[in-house]
Each structure stands twice: as structure tokens, then as C-alpha cells.
Amino acid sequence: MTATVLRTQSRVSIHNCDVGEHTLCAAQVGLAGSTVLGRNVVMGGQSGTAGHLKIGDFATIAGKSGVTKSLEGGKTYAGFPAIEHKLWLRLQAKIAGLLKRQ
């Protein structure tokens, strides 16, 4: 069995999506129609996007995250809907604290 190889400056078009150079999509990543991924975007396993949005250059999307709106580049996002990773971590800590109080 042979692997798919994308050379430098390759473009992939799936349902009118545009995937930038050096972008990494792990297993089971889903891209809805007309999504634009910038350069050097990393998408963790089982993450996905809604259609007609743009993810900026050097953005990182954590595994199992759901992108529902366009995101700035150079930041890390997590959760559903995808929010900045630091905010997501704080929210998870607060939820855990609330559950311990009960």
C-alpha cells in the first residue's frame, strides 16, 4: 500500500476547501465545504470545521474540537465551539470545582 504524498506548495481541493502549505491534519479531521486553512495549521484528531470559514496561518486546533466560526492565526484553540485553549482550560477547571462542591 502506498501513502499519499503532498509536495511543498501543494494544494488539496475537497468540497472546494483550500488547505495551505505545510498544514497537518491528523486522523478523522473533517472539513466542511469552502473552508480555508492557512499555512502551517495543525488540526488534531477528530476535529472538524463548519463550512465557509477561514482558519489563519499557524493556528492549532486541539483534538475533538469543533470550529464554528473563522479563527485568527497564531493561536491554539480547543473545545466545542472552539475557543482559545487557555480559556477552555480555565472553564474546565471551574466546572470541575463546581462538581466537587455538590
Image (spheres, rainbow, N blue to C red):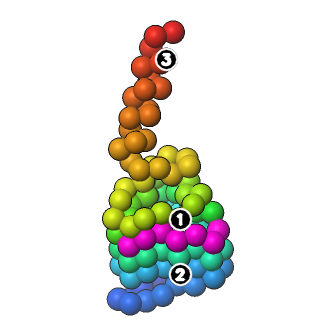
Mark 3 crowdedness (10 Å alpha carbons): few <14, some 14-19, many ≥20: few
Q: Along the polypeptide, which appears first: circle 1 or circle 3?
A: 1
Please tell me whether mark 1 sits on a helix, a strand or a loop.
loop
Is 12 within the magenta?
Answer: no
Q: Tell me what residue is drawn at x 38 percent, y 73 percent.
A: 57
Q: Is residue 33 above or below residue 82?
A: below
Residue at numbered disc 1: 70
Residue 77: give x, y in percent of width and height: 42, 53
Segment tinted magenta in the rendering: 51-57
Please tell me whether mark 2 sits on a helix, a strand or a loop.
strand
Q: Tell me what residue is drawn at x 52 percent, y 71 percent.
A: 54
Q: Along the polypeptide, which appears first: circle 1 or circle 2?
A: 2
28 or 16: nearer the viewer: 16
Mark 1 crowdedness (10 Å alpha carbons): few <14, some 14-19, many ≥20: some
| Residue 25 falls in image quadrant | bottom left
Three-letter code for the amino acid on which mark 2 is drawn: Asp
The rendered magenta stretch, by its main secondary structure, is classed as loop
Residue 6: give x, y in percent of width and height: 42, 85
Residue at numbered disc 3: 99
Residue 24: give x, y in percent of width and height: 40, 70
Residue 37: give x, y in percent of width and height: 48, 74
Three-letter code for the amino acid on which mark 1 is drawn: Ser
57 or 4: nearer the viewer: 57
